[in-house]
Amino acid sequence: MKYRWIFFLVVLLFGCVRKEDPVDKILDSTVALVNEGSVYCTGVWVGKSKILTAGHCLEGKTSVSYLNYSDYMKKNYTNVKIGVVAKVSDTDLGLISVLMED
């Protein structure tokens, strides 16, 4: 009987611990490229200051506006930042370079 209570308490305590939601992790690593509040393309962080996206999303652009996709889903448009188009390849890959904030 004593062990049942211990088992119950362990299950209760560990069941209440919030585990990291994989969807949150994906949304935090995904970037929305935006134009006047609308997403026209997405990208992913591939480093602390680089975003990988499709090359056709960057055609004719020298800079882009972006925000983390989780902010876009929450309609939090106050975190929109500017990135500089670093490279567009022949294989439809585009790279955005972003300024790091202090």
Image (cartoon, rainbow, N blue to C red):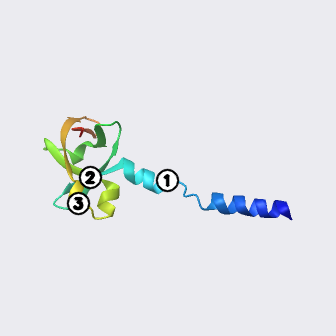
In primary-sequence order, the first of circles 2 and 1 is 1
Give the residue displayed 29% in from the left and 60% down from the top.
72
Q: Secondary structure at mark 1?
A: helix
Q: Which residue is mark 3?
A: 77
Name which quarter of the figure residue 38 lies in.
bottom left
Q: Residues within 10 Å of mark 1 (few under 14, many from 20)?
A: few
Q: Is residue 84 above or below residue 74?
A: above
- Residue drawn at x 26%, y 52% is 67
Secondary structure beneath label 2: strand
Q: Quadrant of the N terminus?
A: bottom right
Q: Marks 3 and 2, how far apart in space?
A: 8 Å
- 4 relative position to 11: left or right: right
Count up the numbered dots: 3
Cα distance in 3D space between marks 3 and 1: 23 Å
Q: Read off the residue under disc 1.
A: 22
Q: What amino acid is at disc 1?
A: Pro
Label 3 close to label 2 by CB (< 8 Å): yes
Whether residue 97 is situated above or below residue 42 in the rendered picture:
above
Question: What secondary structure is found at the residue carrying circle 3?
Answer: helix
Res 39 quadrant in image: bottom left
Q: Tell me the residue at 64%/57% (across/down).
A: 14
| Image point (16%, 60%), residue name | 36
Three-letter code for the amino acid on which mark 3 is drawn: Tyr
Q: Which residue is mark 2?
A: 67
Residue type at mark 2? Answer: Leu
